[in-house]
Amino acid sequence: MKRSLPVAAAAAASVLVLAGCGGSSGSGAADTLRLGVVLNPTTWDPANSDGGGNTLFFQALYDTLLRLTPAGDPAPGLAESWSYNADRTVLTLKLRQGAKLGDGTPFDSSMVEPNLTAIKDGSGGFAASLASLKSVKATDATTVELHLDAPDPGLLYNLGLGASYILPPAALKGDGLTTKPAPTGPYSLDAAGTIPGSKYTFTKNDKYWDSGSYPYKKLTYTVLTDDTARLNAVQSHQVDAVTGKTTMIEAAKSAGLNVESAPLDWQGLVIADRAGKMVPALADARVRRAINYAIDAAGIVKSIDKGSGTRSTQIFNPSGEAYDTALNSRYPYDPKKAKQLLAEAGYKDGFTLPMASFSSLWGAWEPVFKEQLGAVGIKVKFHTTQPSDIIKSFSEYPVFMVTWQTAKESYVDILQMLSKTSLINPQKTTDPKVESLVEKMQTGTDQERAAAGKQLSAYLVDQAWFNPWASLNNAVMIGGKSVKFDLQTGNLVPALRFITPAS
């Protein structure tokens, strides 16, 4: 849940359940698709949403300028085509002529600027995605220019991911979207069929320009919170499929369910206090490397993640240009090496490491890395914390665990993980070499960008800013044959238009 909150812990917590189709209309379109979600929508306003848990809600309600293909590439949406100027600081979008939004309103260029500005100036997870946006200019009814402060290789991807939701401009004023959506997409919220906090019902907008890509007349989202109940439901064919935690995959396969997957997350620890402000020891790269050696990452992948991913020392998506498989052998499990590095750094007797504990999210992993770090002298002291406080905890603790969604476009990952506005860079850490390599990725040719990306990944691995254990796949566990999925690289759940009747 790419995943990945835009990319954060919601990727680990969000689980989608798909129940059976309710039949077919005369045209062959299925009547109802029933989805189950773990998280309630926190707001109906994309500009002030953390993303992740709200994605399926927003996909039903709102349209976007661009979309993403299953492979994670930008594709036309309300914008039919696009082009850059020579220095890639002006993106020109040619908008779809004659398109009607879900509420029947004709779409035109006047709607683009207020929506992009709202997202850029909002408090939500997509604000950082539009950090390069300087101004938006509508040159005619079907043409818009996005003027940038500097080239942004991740912009097209982010526009397709959710940084370009289009709402009626009038709805962007005030705080009405906090409690009531203003739909422009394929579906509208049915208030009569909705019980806030429990069940949400959506009905199809037939006036929507691309209604043919959404075969279901109705959607229902039911809030479900128990892993065992979800898996039992798909095993007993009460639901058609479930996507979610990697710890469920082995049981699903044993039950004879079909499991489909695509690259999504990296999992491990963020060593955020690289300057040693909270824990002085962490300012020393040798200590951070010791943490990497101390944890049996390959063992975690095998025993807890049940082989649902591959051992990785990197924070980038395997399909991205920055990923280098040669780096994955850098930190084998070696407690002796970890103790040696700690002694060299002046911490022979170890030190205490305070961390937030989220047993409902990380209950299977926390005891393992606590024991393994303790074995080399790093004494983890857990503080029980509520899942609702996970973002707050990032800035309160020097190290924290994540399952973090990644993208096919490595520059998107840079913005989401290394920028000063990143949720998992709460101390706004920077480094001259990192900045130099990021600049090359931003402004260089495709070849130069790929080379700089791999150099950046190698530098981050060497400096041990993070302690990645694995590159994980998302997974859809399917028990019936009535629903077909086309998964997306970098997204926890497939886009609604890629969930279709199987026949």
Image (cartoon, rainbow, N blue to C red):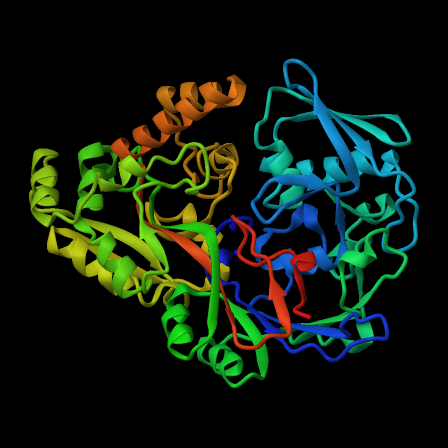
Closest to the observer, 38 or 206: 206
Is 37 situated left or right of 375 in this image?
right
Q: Quadrant of the C terminus?
A: bottom right
Up-down relation of residue 108 to residue 198 (above or below): above
Closest to the observer, 48 or 249: 249
Residue 275's quadrant in the figure?
A: top left
Image location (x, y in percent) of residue 279: 26, 42
Is 130 situated left or right of 424 in this image?
right
Up-down relation of residue 365 to residue 194 (above or below): above
At horizontal 48% and vertical 32% (from top left) the residue drawn is 419
Image location (x, y in percent) of residue 314: 34, 40
Q: Please say whether residue 90 is visible from this viewpoint.
A: yes
Image location (x, y in percent) of residue 403: 41, 53
At horizontal 12% and vertical 40% (from top left) the residue drawn is 342
Is 123 situated left or right of 403 in this image?
right
Q: Please say whether residue 122 is visible from this viewpoint.
A: no
Q: Residue furthest top?
A: 86
Image location (x, y in percent) of residue 165: 73, 45
Up-down relation of residue 222 to residue 384 (above or below): below
